[in-house]
Amino acid sequence: MSASEFESVEASLSKYISPGDLDEVRRILYGKQTRKLDFPQSATDAAAERGFDLQGCVFEASSEQLRLPRIVRVGLIQNKIVLPTDAPVLDQIAALHKRVGEIVEVAAMCGVNIVCFQEAWTMPFAFCTRERQPWTEFAESAEDGFTTRFCQELAKKYNMVVVSPILERDEIHGGTLWNTAVVVSNSGKVLGKTRKNHIPRVGDFNESTYYMEGNTGHRVFQTQFGKIAVNICYGRHHPLNWFMYSMNGAEIIFNPSATVGELSEPMWPIEARNAAIANHCFTCAINRVGTVSHHEFGHFYGSSYVAAPDGSRSPGLSRIRDGLLIAELDLNLTRQIGDQWNFKMTGRYEMYGEELTKAVQNDFKPNIIKE
Ligand SMILES: NC(=O)NCCC(=O)O
């Protein structure tokens, strides 16, 4: 079986591990078992008709005396491109709006409060090609491009925060391109945007050909459902990137991505999960599925998942099919685990701040003791 035909690790475990052992295998691999989230029959039927994987789970926290549970449902959407990459640009965008719109409708049936799409969701992941045309034509204004307007409609209609990662064209600053996530409030207003901080220079990921490192820092967005941040794709390899979102108060950090099997699949289940543990927050890693048809680039392996601050994680979505993963989170777990493990308290940030400040100076001398 080829990598692009293999459904998921979870499906194989369920198929080949004896039922008696499966719970223990899952506990060791995935941490405290999450409860399965029940969906309305109409949602399950719609997902089956529309041909996507629908999965859901619940991360619980202990009850507290002074705070009510802070329950939020997040939805992670992974999808293939819909039309061939040589179809007219506007048709490709419209087809993706339609496809993702029908998945969001199911998310709404399941009570999702915050939905996040994959990186550069309105286009093929064409940055591997280094070609300019037609790919740069997919870029849009973050503030009032047609994709943002589409997301505003979804947000209002479903009372849902929408995180929409796009290729941005910033007309105010010379028509420059950016890799940006737009955060639309459930009121339908654009709450703001945040740009990809770390741009890959690995393998065929030639993104620095198109846009520069983001200049929006580590913004956190206060939504009605919790404080959220967006660490776009390659930023997940940078622990300090996650850390700074967390220092600014993020309770949930989304990681919309586009990455291929040979390059990163062994790292994928570890990085966002480790970030959830290290920063006492929830992380939501989303990867697209399929291939970029006209370029030999590799298989985008989906496998979107949610990780919790206690080290537990959801099952992954399919490696080969479109999907919607819904996780119900009790945000009280972030402080509960912080109080248990105290990483923020034991972090010695002043020491690292001082040492890092020295380490980036030209006259830095590494602290090595020699005989
Ligand atoms: N989109 C993107 O940044 N991909 C880089 C490869 C990776 O981070 O796995």
Image: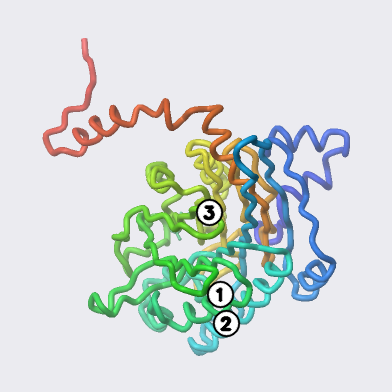
Earlier-in-chain disc, 1 versus 2: 2
Earlier-in-chain disc, 3 versus 2: 2
Look at the numbered disc 3 and give the secondary structure of its residue. strand
The residue that mark 2 highlights is: 84
Q: Check disc 3 and give the amino acid type.
A: Gly
Residue 31 % position (x, y): 68, 36
Front-most of 300 and 44? 44
Residue 160 % position (x, y): 59, 68
Q: Is residue 134 left or right of residue 351?
A: right
Q: Is residue 69 above or below residue 228?
A: above
Quote the CA–CA distance across marks 1 and 2: 7 Å
Front-most of 273 and 295? 273
1 vs 2, front mark: 2
Q: Is residue 351 above or below residue 159?
A: above
Q: Check disc 1 and give the amino acid type.
A: Ser
10 Å crowding of disc 3: few (<14), some (14-19), many (20+): some
Q: Is residue 184 left or right of residue 324?
A: left
10 Å crowding of disc 1: few (<14), some (14-19), many (20+): some
The residue that mark 3 highlights is: 226
Quote the CA–CA distance across marks 3 and 2: 38 Å
Residue 120 % position (x, y): 48, 69
Ligand 1's image quarter is: bottom left
10 Å crowding of disc 2: few (<14), some (14-19), many (20+): few
Q: Is residue 152 left or right of residue 139?
A: right
The residue that mark 1 highlights is: 293
Residue 159 position by quadrant = bottom right
3 vs 1, front mark: 3
* Label 3–label 2 contact, CB within 8 A: no
Residue 48 % position (x, y): 80, 70
Q: Which quadrant of the rendered structure holds the N terminus?
A: bottom right
